[in-house]
Amino acid sequence: MRSQRVITIAYFLFLFVLCSAFFLRLPVLWDTDSYYHLAVARLYTSDGLLARIPWARMSLLSNGGNKDFLFHLLLVPFASLPDAAIGGRIALGFFNAAIGTVIALLAWRSIGKAALLVPIWLWLSAPLFFAREVRLRPELLALLLLLLAIAAAAHRRYILLGIIAFAFTEAYTAFHVLLGLCCFWFLVDRKPKLIAAPLLGIAAGLVVRPYPIENLRLWFVQNVLFFVQKSKLDVGAELRPARFPQDFYASAAFIAGIVALVLLAYRRRIEGNRDEVTRRLMWFTTITAVVFTILFLRMLRMANYAYPLIALAVLFAVAGRVRERSAAAVFAITALLALPVTFDADRMKFLSMAPQDVSELDWSAFGRAVPANAKVAAHWSEAEAYAFWAPQGRYLNVLDPIFMAVPYPREYDAQRRVFEGTDPDIPGTVSRILQSDYIALDWTLASPRLVQRLRGDPRLETVYGGYNVLFRVRTPRDVRFVTEWSSHPHGDGFVDVTTNGCTTLTHIETVSNRVRIHYEFAPWGPSTLSIDGKQVHATSTAQLAVLGHGARIDVAFDPGTHTIEVRTCRAGDRAGFYLVER
Protein backbone atom coordinates (compact mmCIF):
# COMPACT_ATOMS: atom_id res chain seq x y z
CA MET A 1 0.00 0.00 0.00
CA ARG A 2 2.80 2.40 0.92
CA SER A 3 4.68 1.66 -2.29
CA GLN A 4 1.55 2.36 -4.31
CA ARG A 5 1.16 5.73 -2.57
CA VAL A 6 4.75 6.59 -3.41
CA ILE A 7 4.16 5.54 -7.04
CA THR A 8 0.95 7.61 -7.11
CA ILE A 9 2.68 10.77 -5.86
CA ALA A 10 5.62 10.26 -8.20
CA TYR A 11 3.28 9.60 -11.11
CA PHE A 12 1.23 12.75 -10.40
CA LEU A 13 4.41 14.83 -10.27
CA PHE A 14 5.62 13.26 -13.52
CA LEU A 15 2.34 14.05 -15.29
CA PHE A 16 2.24 17.54 -13.79
CA VAL A 17 5.72 18.36 -15.09
CA LEU A 18 5.02 16.72 -18.47
CA CYS A 19 1.67 18.45 -18.99
CA SER A 20 2.82 21.83 -17.70
CA ALA A 21 5.85 21.77 -20.00
CA PHE A 22 3.53 21.02 -22.91
CA PHE A 23 1.01 23.74 -22.07
CA LEU A 24 3.71 26.34 -21.41
CA ARG A 25 4.73 25.96 -25.05
CA LEU A 26 1.28 26.97 -26.30
CA PRO A 27 1.21 30.46 -27.87
CA VAL A 28 -2.30 30.98 -26.45
CA LEU A 29 -4.68 29.23 -24.12
CA TRP A 30 -7.05 27.34 -26.36
CA ASP A 31 -10.67 28.52 -26.10
CA THR A 32 -11.49 32.01 -24.87
CA ASP A 33 -13.40 30.42 -21.97
CA SER A 34 -9.97 29.63 -20.49
CA TYR A 35 -9.14 33.32 -20.14
CA TYR A 36 -12.58 34.15 -18.75
CA HIS A 37 -12.27 31.61 -15.92
CA LEU A 38 -8.86 33.03 -15.03
CA ALA A 39 -10.38 36.53 -15.06
CA VAL A 40 -13.06 35.49 -12.55
CA ALA A 41 -10.44 33.88 -10.27
CA ARG A 42 -8.38 37.08 -10.44
CA LEU A 43 -11.52 39.13 -9.66
CA TYR A 44 -12.11 37.05 -6.52
CA THR A 45 -8.53 37.72 -5.49
CA SER A 46 -8.96 41.48 -5.70
CA ASP A 47 -12.65 42.00 -4.86
CA GLY A 48 -13.61 39.05 -2.67
CA LEU A 49 -15.87 36.04 -3.13
CA LEU A 50 -19.06 38.12 -3.24
CA ALA A 51 -17.91 40.06 -6.30
CA ARG A 52 -20.42 40.23 -9.14
CA ILE A 53 -19.24 39.61 -12.70
CA PRO A 54 -18.75 43.12 -14.19
CA TRP A 55 -18.25 42.04 -17.82
CA ALA A 56 -21.82 40.93 -18.58
CA ARG A 57 -24.08 43.95 -18.15
CA MET A 58 -26.83 42.45 -20.32
CA SER A 59 -26.63 38.94 -18.92
CA LEU A 60 -27.97 36.85 -16.07
CA LEU A 61 -24.36 36.53 -14.93
CA SER A 62 -24.36 40.17 -13.80
CA ASN A 63 -26.68 39.34 -10.88
CA GLY A 64 -24.02 37.57 -8.82
CA GLY A 65 -24.54 33.95 -9.80
CA ASN A 66 -21.50 31.83 -10.61
CA LYS A 67 -22.26 28.33 -11.85
CA ASP A 68 -18.57 27.30 -11.63
CA PHE A 69 -17.79 28.74 -8.18
CA LEU A 70 -15.46 26.00 -6.85
CA PHE A 71 -13.53 25.81 -10.13
CA HIS A 72 -12.80 29.52 -9.89
CA LEU A 73 -11.73 29.18 -6.26
CA LEU A 74 -9.23 26.49 -7.24
CA LEU A 75 -7.88 28.77 -9.96
CA VAL A 76 -7.18 31.62 -7.52
CA PRO A 77 -3.57 30.54 -6.71
CA PHE A 78 -2.77 30.24 -10.42
CA ALA A 79 -4.46 33.53 -11.38
CA SER A 80 -2.57 35.26 -8.54
CA LEU A 81 0.80 34.64 -10.19
CA PRO A 82 2.52 37.72 -11.68
CA ASP A 83 1.54 36.47 -15.14
CA ALA A 84 -1.94 34.99 -14.82
CA ALA A 85 -1.80 33.63 -18.39
CA ILE A 86 1.23 31.54 -17.41
CA GLY A 87 -0.68 30.55 -14.28
CA GLY A 88 -3.48 29.30 -16.50
CA ARG A 89 -1.09 27.01 -18.35
CA ILE A 90 0.20 25.60 -15.07
CA ALA A 91 -3.40 25.11 -13.90
CA LEU A 92 -4.04 23.09 -17.04
CA GLY A 93 -1.05 20.93 -16.17
CA PHE A 94 -2.38 20.45 -12.64
CA PHE A 95 -5.89 19.39 -13.66
CA ASN A 96 -4.66 17.09 -16.41
CA ALA A 97 -2.18 15.48 -14.03
CA ALA A 98 -4.90 14.98 -11.41
CA ILE A 99 -7.29 13.43 -13.95
CA GLY A 100 -4.56 11.20 -15.36
CA THR A 101 -3.52 10.01 -11.90
CA VAL A 102 -7.09 9.10 -10.90
CA ILE A 103 -7.63 7.25 -14.19
CA ALA A 104 -4.40 5.30 -13.65
CA LEU A 105 -5.35 4.43 -10.06
CA LEU A 106 -8.74 3.12 -11.16
CA ALA A 107 -7.24 1.14 -14.05
CA TRP A 108 -4.54 -0.33 -11.77
CA ARG A 109 -7.18 -2.59 -10.22
CA SER A 110 -7.62 -4.27 -13.61
CA ILE A 111 -4.22 -4.40 -15.31
CA GLY A 112 -1.66 -3.53 -12.66
CA LYS A 113 1.26 -1.25 -13.51
CA ALA A 114 0.25 -1.09 -17.17
CA ALA A 115 -2.43 1.32 -15.93
CA LEU A 116 0.24 4.03 -15.82
CA LEU A 117 0.09 4.10 -19.62
CA VAL A 118 -3.68 4.53 -19.81
CA PRO A 119 -3.87 8.36 -19.41
CA ILE A 120 -1.13 8.95 -21.99
CA TRP A 121 -2.78 6.43 -24.31
CA LEU A 122 -6.09 8.29 -23.96
CA TRP A 123 -4.53 11.64 -24.77
CA LEU A 124 -2.80 10.27 -27.86
CA SER A 125 -5.35 7.81 -29.24
CA ALA A 126 -8.50 9.89 -28.63
CA PRO A 127 -7.90 13.35 -30.16
CA LEU A 128 -11.49 14.42 -29.48
CA PHE A 129 -10.81 13.79 -25.78
CA PHE A 130 -7.42 15.49 -25.95
CA ALA A 131 -9.00 18.54 -27.60
CA ARG A 132 -11.21 18.95 -24.52
CA GLU A 133 -8.38 18.49 -22.03
CA VAL A 134 -6.39 21.43 -23.40
CA ARG A 135 -9.16 23.88 -22.43
CA LEU A 136 -9.13 25.42 -18.96
CA ARG A 137 -12.78 24.84 -18.26
CA PRO A 138 -14.86 23.51 -15.33
CA GLU A 139 -15.45 20.27 -17.25
CA LEU A 140 -11.97 19.22 -16.15
CA LEU A 141 -12.93 19.45 -12.49
CA ALA A 142 -16.30 17.85 -13.21
CA LEU A 143 -14.61 14.82 -14.81
CA LEU A 144 -12.20 14.50 -11.89
CA LEU A 145 -15.03 14.61 -9.35
CA LEU A 146 -17.14 12.18 -11.38
CA LEU A 147 -14.32 9.61 -11.42
CA LEU A 148 -13.86 10.04 -7.67
CA ALA A 149 -17.62 9.65 -7.15
CA ILE A 150 -17.58 6.32 -9.01
CA ALA A 151 -14.72 5.09 -6.82
CA ALA A 152 -16.41 6.26 -3.60
CA ALA A 153 -19.72 4.66 -4.54
CA ALA A 154 -18.08 1.36 -5.52
CA HIS A 155 -16.22 1.24 -2.18
CA ARG A 156 -19.45 2.20 -0.36
CA ARG A 157 -17.87 5.24 1.21
CA TYR A 158 -21.06 7.21 1.39
CA ILE A 159 -19.83 10.16 3.47
CA LEU A 160 -17.09 10.71 0.91
CA LEU A 161 -19.68 10.37 -1.87
CA GLY A 162 -21.78 13.10 -0.23
CA ILE A 163 -18.74 15.38 0.05
CA ILE A 164 -17.92 14.79 -3.62
CA ALA A 165 -21.55 15.56 -4.55
CA PHE A 166 -21.28 18.81 -2.57
CA ALA A 167 -18.06 19.73 -4.44
CA PHE A 168 -19.60 18.74 -7.80
CA THR A 169 -22.55 21.08 -7.15
CA GLU A 170 -20.20 23.93 -6.27
CA ALA A 171 -18.02 23.29 -9.31
CA TYR A 172 -20.37 22.55 -12.18
CA THR A 173 -23.80 23.63 -13.28
CA ALA A 174 -25.17 20.17 -14.17
CA PHE A 175 -25.33 18.87 -10.58
CA HIS A 176 -28.43 16.85 -11.49
CA VAL A 177 -26.28 14.54 -13.64
CA LEU A 178 -24.49 13.07 -10.63
CA LEU A 179 -27.75 12.52 -8.77
CA GLY A 180 -29.26 10.82 -11.81
CA LEU A 181 -26.22 8.54 -12.13
CA CYS A 182 -26.49 7.58 -8.47
CA CYS A 183 -30.10 6.55 -9.09
CA PHE A 184 -28.91 4.27 -11.90
CA TRP A 185 -26.16 2.87 -9.68
CA PHE A 186 -28.80 2.11 -7.05
CA LEU A 187 -30.42 -0.31 -9.49
CA VAL A 188 -27.20 -2.39 -9.32
CA ASP A 189 -26.27 -2.02 -5.66
CA ARG A 190 -29.51 -1.57 -3.74
CA LYS A 191 -28.13 0.67 -1.04
CA PRO A 192 -30.39 3.64 -0.16
CA LYS A 193 -27.32 5.65 0.88
CA LEU A 194 -26.29 5.68 -2.79
CA ILE A 195 -29.07 8.21 -3.28
CA ALA A 196 -29.34 9.76 0.16
CA ALA A 197 -25.67 10.76 0.48
CA PRO A 198 -25.34 12.63 -2.83
CA LEU A 199 -28.80 14.15 -2.37
CA LEU A 200 -27.73 15.69 0.95
CA GLY A 201 -24.43 16.83 -0.56
CA ILE A 202 -26.15 18.45 -3.52
CA ALA A 203 -28.73 20.17 -1.29
CA ALA A 204 -25.93 21.59 0.85
CA GLY A 205 -24.04 22.70 -2.25
CA LEU A 206 -27.05 24.59 -3.55
CA VAL A 207 -27.41 26.54 -0.31
CA VAL A 208 -23.83 27.06 0.89
CA ARG A 209 -22.58 29.41 -1.80
CA PRO A 210 -22.89 33.09 -2.73
CA TYR A 211 -26.17 34.09 -4.43
CA PRO A 212 -27.94 30.68 -4.22
CA ILE A 213 -31.19 31.91 -5.83
CA GLU A 214 -29.36 33.38 -8.81
CA ASN A 215 -27.42 30.15 -9.21
CA LEU A 216 -30.65 28.13 -9.32
CA ARG A 217 -31.90 30.50 -11.99
CA LEU A 218 -28.69 29.99 -13.99
CA TRP A 219 -29.13 26.22 -13.64
CA PHE A 220 -32.70 26.35 -14.97
CA VAL A 221 -31.80 28.63 -17.87
CA GLN A 222 -28.75 26.64 -18.99
CA ASN A 223 -30.08 23.13 -18.40
CA VAL A 224 -33.74 23.54 -19.34
CA LEU A 225 -34.43 26.69 -21.37
CA PHE A 226 -31.21 26.28 -23.36
CA PHE A 227 -32.40 23.04 -24.94
CA VAL A 228 -35.78 24.62 -25.72
CA GLN A 229 -34.19 27.60 -27.48
CA LYS A 230 -30.96 26.01 -28.74
CA SER A 231 -31.97 26.14 -32.42
CA LYS A 232 -32.45 29.92 -32.16
CA LEU A 233 -29.07 30.64 -30.58
CA ASP A 234 -25.60 31.20 -32.05
CA VAL A 235 -24.07 28.33 -30.11
CA GLY A 236 -20.54 27.00 -30.57
CA ALA A 237 -19.51 24.03 -32.71
CA GLU A 238 -18.91 21.93 -29.59
CA LEU A 239 -22.67 21.52 -29.22
CA ARG A 240 -23.10 19.87 -32.60
CA PRO A 241 -23.54 16.09 -32.77
CA ALA A 242 -20.59 13.82 -33.39
CA ARG A 243 -20.09 13.39 -37.14
CA PHE A 244 -19.88 10.08 -38.92
CA PRO A 245 -17.43 9.04 -40.23
CA GLN A 246 -15.05 11.96 -39.51
CA ASP A 247 -15.10 11.84 -35.71
CA PHE A 248 -15.05 8.06 -35.65
CA TYR A 249 -12.08 8.00 -38.02
CA ALA A 250 -10.26 10.32 -35.61
CA SER A 251 -10.93 7.75 -32.87
CA ALA A 252 -9.83 4.72 -34.90
CA ALA A 253 -6.74 4.00 -32.77
CA PHE A 254 -8.75 4.28 -29.56
CA ILE A 255 -11.40 1.91 -30.92
CA ALA A 256 -8.67 -0.49 -32.09
CA GLY A 257 -7.17 -0.50 -28.59
CA ILE A 258 -10.54 -1.27 -26.99
CA VAL A 259 -11.19 -4.09 -29.47
CA ALA A 260 -7.70 -5.53 -28.88
CA LEU A 261 -8.25 -5.61 -25.10
CA VAL A 262 -11.57 -7.39 -25.53
CA LEU A 263 -10.05 -9.97 -27.92
CA LEU A 264 -7.14 -10.62 -25.57
CA ALA A 265 -9.58 -11.21 -22.71
CA TYR A 266 -11.73 -13.50 -24.86
CA ARG A 267 -8.74 -15.62 -25.88
CA ARG A 268 -7.77 -16.24 -22.25
CA ARG A 269 -10.59 -18.56 -21.30
CA ILE A 270 -10.27 -18.04 -17.56
CA GLU A 271 -12.40 -16.22 -15.07
CA GLY A 272 -11.09 -12.79 -14.25
CA ASN A 273 -10.15 -11.83 -10.73
CA ARG A 274 -13.20 -9.61 -10.17
CA ASP A 275 -14.05 -9.00 -6.51
CA GLU A 276 -17.19 -7.17 -5.35
CA VAL A 277 -15.58 -3.72 -5.53
CA THR A 278 -14.31 -4.37 -9.05
CA ARG A 279 -17.75 -5.67 -10.05
CA ARG A 280 -19.39 -2.50 -8.77
CA LEU A 281 -16.74 -0.38 -10.46
CA MET A 282 -17.48 -2.18 -13.72
CA TRP A 283 -21.22 -1.64 -13.48
CA PHE A 284 -21.07 1.96 -12.26
CA THR A 285 -18.51 2.91 -14.89
CA THR A 286 -20.37 1.10 -17.66
CA ILE A 287 -23.66 2.81 -16.78
CA THR A 288 -21.94 6.19 -16.69
CA ALA A 289 -20.12 5.49 -19.96
CA VAL A 290 -23.39 4.58 -21.70
CA VAL A 291 -25.03 7.80 -20.50
CA PHE A 292 -22.17 10.01 -21.67
CA THR A 293 -21.72 8.13 -24.95
CA ILE A 294 -25.35 8.88 -25.78
CA LEU A 295 -24.77 12.52 -24.84
CA PHE A 296 -21.57 12.56 -26.91
CA LEU A 297 -23.47 11.42 -29.98
CA ARG A 298 -25.65 14.51 -29.49
CA MET A 299 -22.99 16.99 -28.30
CA LEU A 300 -19.32 16.82 -29.21
CA ARG A 301 -18.23 18.43 -25.93
CA MET A 302 -19.20 15.26 -24.06
CA ALA A 303 -16.05 13.62 -25.46
CA ASN A 304 -14.47 14.89 -22.24
CA TYR A 305 -16.38 12.21 -20.33
CA ALA A 306 -17.19 9.50 -22.88
CA TYR A 307 -13.67 8.38 -23.81
CA PRO A 308 -12.14 7.84 -20.34
CA LEU A 309 -15.33 6.22 -19.06
CA ILE A 310 -15.51 3.81 -22.01
CA ALA A 311 -11.85 2.87 -21.46
CA LEU A 312 -12.34 2.26 -17.74
CA ALA A 313 -15.56 0.30 -18.27
CA VAL A 314 -13.77 -2.07 -20.68
CA LEU A 315 -10.76 -2.40 -18.35
CA PHE A 316 -12.97 -3.36 -15.41
CA ALA A 317 -14.84 -5.83 -17.63
CA VAL A 318 -11.60 -7.62 -18.61
CA ALA A 319 -10.06 -7.43 -15.12
CA GLY A 320 -7.70 -10.34 -14.52
CA ARG A 321 -8.00 -11.65 -18.08
CA VAL A 322 -5.39 -9.45 -19.80
CA ARG A 323 -1.72 -9.61 -18.81
CA GLU A 324 0.08 -6.40 -17.91
CA ARG A 325 2.56 -6.74 -20.76
CA SER A 326 -0.17 -7.41 -23.30
CA ALA A 327 -2.14 -4.37 -22.17
CA ALA A 328 0.99 -2.22 -22.25
CA ALA A 329 1.73 -3.41 -25.80
CA VAL A 330 -1.81 -2.54 -26.91
CA PHE A 331 -1.55 0.95 -25.45
CA ALA A 332 1.90 1.60 -26.94
CA ILE A 333 1.10 0.32 -30.45
CA THR A 334 -2.29 2.06 -30.82
CA ALA A 335 -0.91 5.31 -29.39
CA LEU A 336 1.90 5.32 -31.95
CA LEU A 337 -0.56 4.56 -34.75
CA ALA A 338 -2.70 7.49 -33.61
CA LEU A 339 0.04 10.14 -33.70
CA PRO A 340 -0.52 11.30 -37.32
CA VAL A 341 -4.24 11.72 -36.64
CA THR A 342 -3.93 13.20 -33.16
CA PHE A 343 -1.47 15.87 -34.22
CA ASP A 344 -3.11 16.61 -37.55
CA ALA A 345 -2.35 20.21 -38.49
CA ASP A 346 -5.99 21.26 -38.78
CA ARG A 347 -7.11 19.57 -35.58
CA MET A 348 -4.20 20.77 -33.47
CA LYS A 349 -3.60 24.11 -35.16
CA PHE A 350 -3.30 25.82 -31.79
CA LEU A 351 0.04 24.03 -31.33
CA SER A 352 1.58 25.75 -34.33
CA MET A 353 -0.11 29.15 -34.23
CA ALA A 354 2.31 31.86 -35.27
CA PRO A 355 2.15 35.48 -34.05
CA GLN A 356 0.63 36.50 -37.37
CA ASP A 357 -2.41 34.35 -36.58
CA VAL A 358 -3.19 35.41 -33.02
CA SER A 359 -1.11 36.34 -30.03
CA GLU A 360 -1.39 37.35 -26.42
CA LEU A 361 0.65 40.44 -27.29
CA ASP A 362 -2.21 41.63 -29.48
CA TRP A 363 -4.77 40.99 -26.74
CA SER A 364 -2.54 42.82 -24.28
CA ALA A 365 -2.21 45.87 -26.55
CA PHE A 366 -5.96 45.81 -27.15
CA GLY A 367 -6.52 45.73 -23.40
CA ARG A 368 -4.44 48.87 -22.87
CA ALA A 369 -6.53 50.72 -25.46
CA VAL A 370 -9.89 50.07 -23.75
CA PRO A 371 -10.89 53.06 -21.57
CA ALA A 372 -11.95 52.45 -17.98
CA ASN A 373 -15.64 51.48 -17.68
CA ALA A 374 -16.04 51.69 -21.46
CA LYS A 375 -19.35 50.19 -22.59
CA VAL A 376 -18.25 47.83 -25.33
CA ALA A 377 -20.42 45.79 -27.68
CA ALA A 378 -18.67 42.47 -28.30
CA HIS A 379 -19.73 38.96 -29.22
CA TRP A 380 -20.15 36.75 -26.15
CA SER A 381 -17.29 34.42 -27.10
CA GLU A 382 -14.75 37.20 -27.74
CA ALA A 383 -15.81 39.09 -24.61
CA GLU A 384 -14.48 36.13 -22.61
CA ALA A 385 -10.92 36.94 -23.66
CA TYR A 386 -11.52 40.68 -23.26
CA ALA A 387 -12.63 40.11 -19.66
CA PHE A 388 -9.09 38.87 -18.97
CA TRP A 389 -7.04 41.24 -21.11
CA ALA A 390 -9.23 44.35 -20.69
CA PRO A 391 -11.06 43.83 -17.37
CA GLN A 392 -11.79 47.55 -17.14
CA GLY A 393 -14.26 47.24 -20.04
CA ARG A 394 -17.98 46.52 -19.64
CA TYR A 395 -19.23 44.04 -22.23
CA LEU A 396 -22.61 42.46 -22.99
CA ASN A 397 -22.44 38.74 -22.21
CA VAL A 398 -20.04 35.83 -21.74
CA LEU A 399 -20.02 32.00 -21.67
CA ASP A 400 -23.37 31.24 -23.29
CA PRO A 401 -25.79 33.19 -25.51
CA ILE A 402 -28.78 31.93 -23.48
CA PHE A 403 -27.72 34.12 -20.55
CA MET A 404 -28.44 37.21 -22.65
CA ALA A 405 -31.24 35.82 -24.80
CA VAL A 406 -33.54 35.10 -21.85
CA PRO A 407 -33.45 38.40 -19.92
CA TYR A 408 -32.69 40.66 -22.91
CA PRO A 409 -34.26 39.08 -26.02
CA ARG A 410 -34.42 42.34 -28.01
CA GLU A 411 -30.82 43.21 -27.22
CA TYR A 412 -29.68 39.66 -27.96
CA ASP A 413 -31.30 39.75 -31.41
CA ALA A 414 -29.64 43.11 -32.06
CA GLN A 415 -26.23 41.84 -30.95
CA ARG A 416 -26.55 38.80 -33.17
CA ARG A 417 -27.52 40.89 -36.21
CA VAL A 418 -24.59 43.23 -35.59
CA PHE A 419 -21.94 40.53 -35.39
CA GLU A 420 -23.39 38.48 -38.22
CA GLY A 421 -23.16 41.61 -40.40
CA THR A 422 -26.87 41.62 -41.26
CA ASP A 423 -27.71 44.86 -39.46
CA PRO A 424 -27.31 47.76 -41.92
CA ASP A 425 -27.00 50.38 -39.16
CA ILE A 426 -24.36 48.97 -36.79
CA PRO A 427 -23.41 52.26 -35.05
CA GLY A 428 -27.07 53.15 -34.54
CA THR A 429 -27.96 49.72 -33.15
CA VAL A 430 -24.89 49.66 -30.90
CA SER A 431 -25.74 53.09 -29.47
CA ARG A 432 -29.52 52.83 -29.14
CA ILE A 433 -30.21 49.18 -28.39
CA LEU A 434 -26.94 47.82 -27.02
CA GLN A 435 -26.25 51.04 -25.08
CA SER A 436 -22.58 50.94 -26.02
CA ASP A 437 -20.03 53.52 -27.10
CA TYR A 438 -17.53 51.03 -28.54
CA ILE A 439 -17.45 47.91 -30.72
CA ALA A 440 -14.78 45.23 -30.31
CA LEU A 441 -14.11 42.15 -32.39
CA ASP A 442 -11.47 39.83 -33.75
CA TRP A 443 -10.95 40.47 -37.47
CA THR A 444 -9.86 36.87 -38.02
CA LEU A 445 -13.24 35.57 -36.82
CA ALA A 446 -15.56 38.24 -38.23
CA SER A 447 -17.88 37.55 -41.15
CA PRO A 448 -16.89 39.21 -44.46
CA ARG A 449 -20.12 41.24 -44.48
CA LEU A 450 -19.39 42.61 -41.01
CA VAL A 451 -15.85 43.56 -42.06
CA GLN A 452 -17.23 45.44 -45.07
CA ARG A 453 -19.75 47.34 -42.96
CA LEU A 454 -17.23 48.37 -40.33
CA ARG A 455 -14.57 49.47 -42.79
CA GLY A 456 -16.93 51.68 -44.78
CA ASP A 457 -18.93 53.37 -42.02
CA PRO A 458 -17.67 56.93 -41.30
CA ARG A 459 -19.34 56.89 -37.85
CA LEU A 460 -16.71 54.44 -36.54
CA GLU A 461 -13.31 55.64 -35.36
CA THR A 462 -10.52 53.11 -34.90
CA VAL A 463 -9.12 53.25 -31.35
CA TYR A 464 -6.99 50.13 -31.68
CA GLY A 465 -6.35 48.23 -34.88
CA GLY A 466 -4.67 44.85 -34.49
CA TYR A 467 -6.11 41.41 -34.96
CA ASN A 468 -8.51 42.52 -32.28
CA VAL A 469 -10.07 45.86 -33.15
CA LEU A 470 -11.72 48.52 -31.02
CA PHE A 471 -13.99 51.12 -32.66
CA ARG A 472 -15.52 54.19 -31.05
CA VAL A 473 -18.97 55.23 -32.25
CA ARG A 474 -18.84 58.93 -33.13
CA THR A 475 -20.61 61.67 -35.08
CA PRO A 476 -18.34 62.68 -37.97
CA ARG A 477 -18.07 66.37 -38.81
CA ASP A 478 -17.25 65.93 -42.47
CA VAL A 479 -20.13 63.58 -43.33
CA ARG A 480 -23.84 64.36 -43.50
CA PHE A 481 -26.49 61.64 -43.57
CA VAL A 482 -29.62 62.73 -45.39
CA THR A 483 -32.34 61.67 -42.94
CA GLU A 484 -35.18 64.18 -43.38
CA TRP A 485 -37.66 62.45 -45.66
CA SER A 486 -41.38 62.55 -46.21
CA SER A 487 -43.09 59.90 -44.05
CA HIS A 488 -39.74 59.49 -42.26
CA PRO A 489 -38.91 62.89 -40.76
CA HIS A 490 -36.26 61.78 -38.27
CA GLY A 491 -33.27 59.49 -38.30
CA ASP A 492 -29.56 59.32 -37.63
CA GLY A 493 -28.20 57.27 -40.50
CA PHE A 494 -30.01 54.38 -42.12
CA VAL A 495 -33.46 55.26 -43.41
CA ASP A 496 -35.45 52.17 -42.39
CA VAL A 497 -38.70 51.95 -44.33
CA THR A 498 -39.36 48.24 -44.05
CA THR A 499 -42.73 47.48 -45.64
CA ASN A 500 -44.37 44.60 -47.43
CA GLY A 501 -43.50 46.00 -50.83
CA CYS A 502 -42.05 49.23 -52.21
CA THR A 503 -42.26 52.77 -50.96
CA THR A 504 -41.29 56.22 -52.23
CA LEU A 505 -39.75 58.95 -50.08
CA THR A 506 -38.94 62.57 -50.88
CA HIS A 507 -36.34 64.96 -49.53
CA ILE A 508 -36.20 68.69 -50.22
CA GLU A 509 -32.70 70.12 -50.61
CA THR A 510 -32.35 73.91 -50.58
CA VAL A 511 -29.10 75.61 -51.64
CA SER A 512 -28.28 79.30 -51.75
CA ASN A 513 -25.32 79.09 -54.16
CA ARG A 514 -24.34 76.87 -57.02
CA VAL A 515 -22.70 73.84 -55.42
CA ARG A 516 -21.52 70.37 -56.33
CA ILE A 517 -22.40 67.67 -53.78
CA HIS A 518 -20.92 64.21 -53.69
CA TYR A 519 -23.38 61.54 -52.54
CA GLU A 520 -23.09 57.88 -51.72
CA PHE A 521 -26.34 55.96 -52.25
CA ALA A 522 -26.39 52.53 -50.55
CA PRO A 523 -29.84 50.89 -50.64
CA TRP A 524 -30.83 47.60 -49.05
CA GLY A 525 -33.14 46.28 -51.76
CA PRO A 526 -33.89 47.19 -55.40
CA SER A 527 -34.07 51.00 -55.54
CA THR A 528 -33.97 54.06 -57.75
CA LEU A 529 -32.65 57.53 -56.94
CA SER A 530 -34.04 60.55 -58.81
CA ILE A 531 -33.14 64.22 -58.54
CA ASP A 532 -35.57 66.87 -59.81
CA GLY A 533 -37.48 64.16 -61.64
CA LYS A 534 -34.42 62.71 -63.37
CA GLN A 535 -33.29 59.20 -62.51
CA VAL A 536 -29.59 59.21 -61.59
CA HIS A 537 -29.15 55.67 -60.28
CA ALA A 538 -31.06 52.40 -60.22
CA THR A 539 -30.40 48.86 -59.03
CA SER A 540 -32.60 45.85 -59.56
CA THR A 541 -30.92 43.55 -57.03
CA ALA A 542 -30.40 43.58 -53.27
CA GLN A 543 -27.36 45.65 -52.23
CA LEU A 544 -27.76 45.22 -48.43
CA ALA A 545 -26.87 48.86 -47.70
CA VAL A 546 -23.12 48.54 -47.15
CA LEU A 547 -21.51 51.94 -46.74
CA GLY A 548 -18.32 52.26 -48.75
CA HIS A 549 -19.79 49.98 -51.43
CA GLY A 550 -22.66 52.21 -52.52
CA ALA A 551 -23.04 54.16 -55.74
CA ARG A 552 -21.03 57.42 -55.90
CA ILE A 553 -23.04 60.25 -57.44
CA ASP A 554 -21.88 63.83 -58.12
CA VAL A 555 -24.67 66.39 -58.48
CA ALA A 556 -24.35 70.09 -59.44
CA PHE A 557 -27.16 72.10 -57.79
CA ASP A 558 -28.16 75.58 -58.91
CA PRO A 559 -29.44 77.96 -56.21
CA GLY A 560 -32.97 77.11 -55.15
CA THR A 561 -35.05 74.16 -54.00
CA HIS A 562 -34.47 70.65 -55.35
CA THR A 563 -36.33 67.37 -54.90
CA ILE A 564 -34.52 64.12 -54.18
CA GLU A 565 -36.73 61.05 -54.54
CA VAL A 566 -35.94 57.46 -53.56
CA ARG A 567 -38.12 54.52 -54.43
CA THR A 568 -36.96 51.44 -52.56
CA CYS A 569 -38.30 47.90 -52.30
CA ARG A 570 -38.08 45.17 -49.73
CA ALA A 571 -35.40 42.48 -49.97
CA GLY A 572 -35.75 39.64 -47.51
CA ASP A 573 -37.06 41.08 -44.26
CA ARG A 574 -35.95 44.68 -44.72
CA ALA A 575 -36.20 47.82 -46.85
CA GLY A 576 -34.27 51.07 -46.55
CA PHE A 577 -31.19 52.96 -47.69
CA TYR A 578 -28.37 55.34 -46.89
CA LEU A 579 -27.92 58.64 -48.69
CA VAL A 580 -24.70 60.22 -47.46
CA GLU A 581 -23.21 63.55 -48.38
CA ARG A 582 -19.43 63.27 -48.25
Image: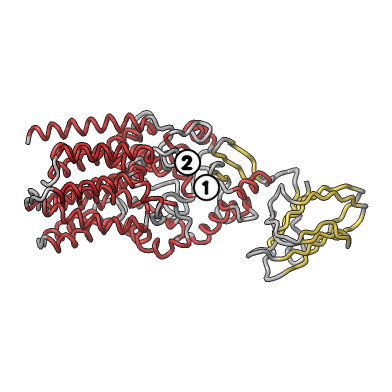
Tell me how far mark 1 sits from mark 2, CA to CA.
Answer: 9 Å
Display colour scheme = secondary structure
Give the answer, above or below, for where 100 lies relative to 86: below
Categorize mark 1 by other alpha carbons within 10 Å: few (<14), some (14-19), many (20+): many
In the rendered image, the quadrant that contains the N terminus is top left
Categorize mark 2 by other alpha carbons within 10 Å: few (<14), some (14-19), many (20+): many
User: Circle 1 sits in a helix, a strand or a loop, which is it?
Assistant: loop
In percent of the image, x 27 and y 38: which residue is there?
333
In percent of the image, x 89 and y 50: which residue is there?
556
Whole-percent x, y for residue 174 in the image: 30, 56
Whole-percent x, y for residue 111 in the image: 14, 42
Whole-percent x, y for residue 252 in the image: 33, 47
The answer to the question of whether label 1 and label 2 lie on touching residues, with beta carbons closer than 8 A, is: yes
Give the answer, above or below, for where 284 lies relative to 71: below
> Where is mark 1, residue-wise?
378
**Type of amino acid under label 2:** Tyr
> Where is mark 2, residue-wise?
386
